[in-house]
Amino acid sequence: MHRLLSSLIALAGSLAAPVALAGPLEDLRARSPEQEVIYFVLPDRFENGDPSNDAGGLKGGKLATGFDPTDKAFYHGGDLKGLAARLGYIQNLGATAIWVGPIFRNKPVQGPKGGESAGYHGYWITDFTHVDPHFGTDADFKALVDAAHARGMKVYMDIIVNHTADVIQYREGAAEGYPYRSKADYPASAYTPFVPRGEERVKAPAWLNDPAYYHNRGNTDWKGESAQLGDFVGLDDLATENPRVLEGMIAIYGDWIDKYGIDGFRIDTAKHVNPEFWRAFVPAMKARAAAKGIPNFHIFGEVMTGDYDPALLASWTRNAGLPGVLDFAFMHAVLKAAGGGSSEELARLPDDDGLYEGGASAALQLPTFLGNHDAGRAAMFLKAANPAMSADELLKRDELAHAMLLTLRGVPTIYYGDEQGFTGAGGDQLSRQDMFASKVAIYNGEALVGSAKTTATESFDPAHPLYRLIAQLSVLRVKTPALTDGRSVTRAASEKPGLVAVSRFDPATGREVLLAFNTSTAPVSAAVAVDPASLSFATLAGTACAARASAPGSVRVDLPPLGFAVCAAKP
Ligand SMILES: [Ca+2]
Ligand SMILES: [Ca+2]
Ligand SMILES: [Ca+2]
């Protein structure tokens, strides 16, 4: 009751300010995961709301504080206050949920001498119970969540259970680079672990400081058992099959639900943890959330695949019981089609949805995306597929890919900065540009899609063509049940550039929405099969649709080069 009361007070406070889509907390809690549009942000790179925390309260140079805004491998100063101050920008883009990169206290700097980098990304946790001082305070996080909720927006935390920061070292194997030592070759202890002096109590909760709760088998080579038991480039790999570790992680993350009332978890490196762990952890988190009045708590895992195979993604929803996985197969299929390649991979996704636990209806809650902080950005992939194309063609292909993302099945997940035309020259650090005025030379040297400016000045332009398109289609999506909850039927696809068409059906009325995309640089004109009951159409977005079916069961689709149309059958 107390929590509800304080949320209502926060809500009442926010109503004094002009807020476009403020809705009560009850409405937000009632929304299912597939009704959201997610915006994924790395707090260090988004907005600096408090320069006094830039060094994280640490003294000394960049190797002590981790702070160097000119170096893409170090902290740049972004924080939770900055993110809270920009909620209006994110909400006006049409996003209804924010996936915030990990905010827990990290080891500020790690890596071999001369090759150090900082924990600005948040994936090197030492203290799982508090906000990293570079990002602000626990109170800043509370204020961010409350402010988002007051606007009707959800907050998803990015969590890690597979590993901690690299603290544990081994007595042997330095010269060889700590290669993985298998269970067969080393059935008892593989390496002799130790914690360097001064770091004995750096982790929290305290049980995490005991090397007995780690695998200590050396670095993973990503194959076989080492994918689950090996260290991720030195990061201490937790013994997640140990009941103490399971119980400890349930306590840690349950506490964040209890204290902050957040709305979901994105799970990092999920496939490097034994499936049995998730089978216990996921129900525990759902129960904890339900007890806090959060019935639609969303959980989705990162199952990275090199070959973008839906079968591997789906296996983690079955064997591990993950409610959702980030849909890497969708990313690959859309970029291939929107880049002018074959659309046959995209065409078969509705059939592949049968692989997921719960089938096609469960697949509606898979977060879909066009790029991310590891792989790289959509614009980079589109450009790589067509290196000689004009700036205008790149913008049109980027818009086409976003039109697919925002109308096809799954929960559209916008990677921050894509809406401002960020491109990047690679994945990882090269795809983590600053939204506030950047001091990183390689970022500022990039041409942005759809804009003549660079990242040297701030990138929060609501007039950017990609921002405007995403905003338009997000609003349309959220109010169109066929797009959030409808089943999908592929109507047209090809191994060559050209027409891609998919029908989606309102789950309540059965009414059809036809989505048509032209992936070629020539106009297309084609007859497309539709439901015989779909006799007349309204244009919801894009190019004008034919007002009437040519005959029951067929409609003419005319699209300009790289154009799209969203056509709703009328009752
Ligand atoms: Ca700051
Ligand atoms: Ca280590
Ligand atoms: Ca592991």
Image (spheres, rainbow, N blue to C red):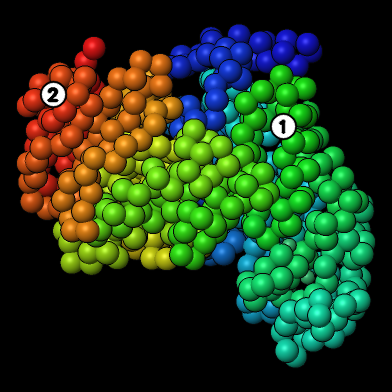
Residue type at mark 1 is Lys
Marked residue nearer the N-terminal end (1 or 2)? 1
Q: Nearer the viewer, mark 1 or mark 2?
A: 2
What residue is drawn where x is 83% and y is 60%?
Answer: 239
Counting other residues with Cα less than 10 Å from the Cα at mark 2, is it few (<14), some (14-19), or many (20 or more)? some
Residue 331 or 54: which is nearer the viewer?
Answer: 331
The location of residue 531, given as percent across then percent down, is: 23, 26
The location of residue 321, given as percent across then percent down, is: 67, 44
The location of residue 436, given as percent across then percent down, is: 46, 46
Q: Quadrant of the C terminus?
A: top left
The location of residue 329, given as percent across then percent down, is: 44, 53
As drawn, the label of residue 286 is 1
Residue 72 or 397: which is nearer the viewer?
Answer: 397
Which of the 4 image quarters holds residue 209? bottom right
Q: How many marks?
A: 2
Question: Ligand 2: which quarter?
Answer: bottom right
Q: Is residue 402 above or below residue 187?
A: above
Task: State yes or no: discs 1 and 2 in contact (Cβ < 8 Å).
Answer: no
Q: Is residue 559 left or right of residue 66?
A: left
**Distance CA(mark 1)–CA(mark 2):** 46 Å
Q: Is residue 428 above or below residue 527?
A: below
Q: Is residue 393 left or right of residue 251?
A: left
Q: Is residue 461 above or below residue 180?
A: above
Q: Quadrant of the N terminus?
A: top right
Outermost residue toward the bottom in this view? 175
Secondary element under disc 2, as helix, strand or loop, is loop
Residue 554 or 435: which is nearer the viewer?
Answer: 554
Q: Is residue 441 above or below residue 44?
A: below
Q: Which residue is mark 2?
A: 552
Secondary element under disc 1, as helix, strand or loop, is helix
